[in-house]
Image (spheres, grey):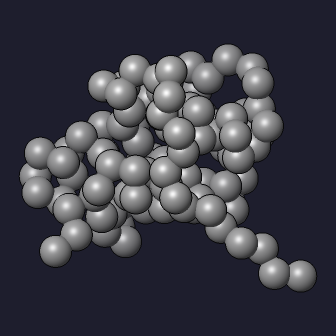
C-alpha cells in the first residue's frame, strides 16, 4: 500500500497570516484529526499527536508554506516536535536567506 504525502499549502482563510504557529497548527489538525489544545511548547511526539510519518509531513509542509529549505541536520526532533521550535526555525531560515535557490 502506497501512501501519498500532501505538501501543498492549506487554506489560510480565517487565519492570522502573521502567525506561523496558527498555520502550522491548522495543518496538524487537518492531517491528524487532533482537536485538543496545541500549546506551542508541547512535545507533540511525546503527546502522541505526531508520529514519525506526520512529523516529516509537517517539515515538508513548513518548507512549502513558508518558502524555506531545511538542511538535513535541522530536521531533528528538537526543531520539529514543538510548534515554538518549528516557528523559530522557519523565522531563522527566512531571515538568513534559507530559501531554495
Number of numbered discs overlaid on the protein picture: 0
Residue at 78% x, 74% y is 3
Compared to residue 56, the image places residue 14 above or below, namely above
Residue at 12% x, 45% y is 95
Which quadrant of the rendered structure holds the N terminus? bottom right
Quarter location, residue 38:
top right
Q: Is residue 77 visible?
A: no
Front residue of 59/4: it is 4
Q: Position of residue 21 (x, y in %)?
A: 44, 29
Compared to residue 56, the image places residue 34 above or below, namely above
Please identify the residue farthest to the right as the structure is shown: 1
Compared to residue 55, the image places residue 47 above or below, namely above
Quarter location, residue 75:
bottom left
Please identify the residue farthest to the front as the structure is shown: 13
Q: Position of residue 36 (x, y in %)?
A: 75, 20
Which quadrant of the rendered structure holds the C terminus? bottom left
Q: Position of residue 86 (x, y in %)?
A: 41, 42
Residue at 47% x, 23% y is 15
Please identify the residue farthest to the bottom as the structure is shown: 1
Query: In the image, is 44 to the left or to the right of 98?
Result: right
Compared to residue 52, the image places residue 94 above or below, namely above
Residue at 37% x, 71% y is 72
Q: Position of residue 50 (x, y in %)?
A: 69, 46
Q: Is residue 24 visible?
A: yes
Amino acid at each position: 500500500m502506497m501512501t501519498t504525502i500532501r505538501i501543498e499549502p492549506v487554506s489560510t482563510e480565517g487565519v492570522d497570516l502573521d502567525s506561523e504557529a496558527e498555520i502550522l497548527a491548522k495543518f496538524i489538525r487537518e492531517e491528524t484529526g487532533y482537536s485538543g489544545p496545541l500549546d506551542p511548547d508541547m512535545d507533540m511526539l511525546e503527546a502522541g499527536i505526531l508520529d514519525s510519518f506526520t512529523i516529516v509531513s509537517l517539515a515538508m509542509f513548513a518548507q512549502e508554506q513558508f518558502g524555506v529549505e531545511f538542511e538535513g541536520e535541522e530536521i531533528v526532533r528538537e526543531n520539529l516536535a514543538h510548534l515554538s521550535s518549528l516557528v523559530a526555525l522557519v523565522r531563522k531560515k527566512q531571515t538568513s536567506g534559507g530559501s531554495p535557490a
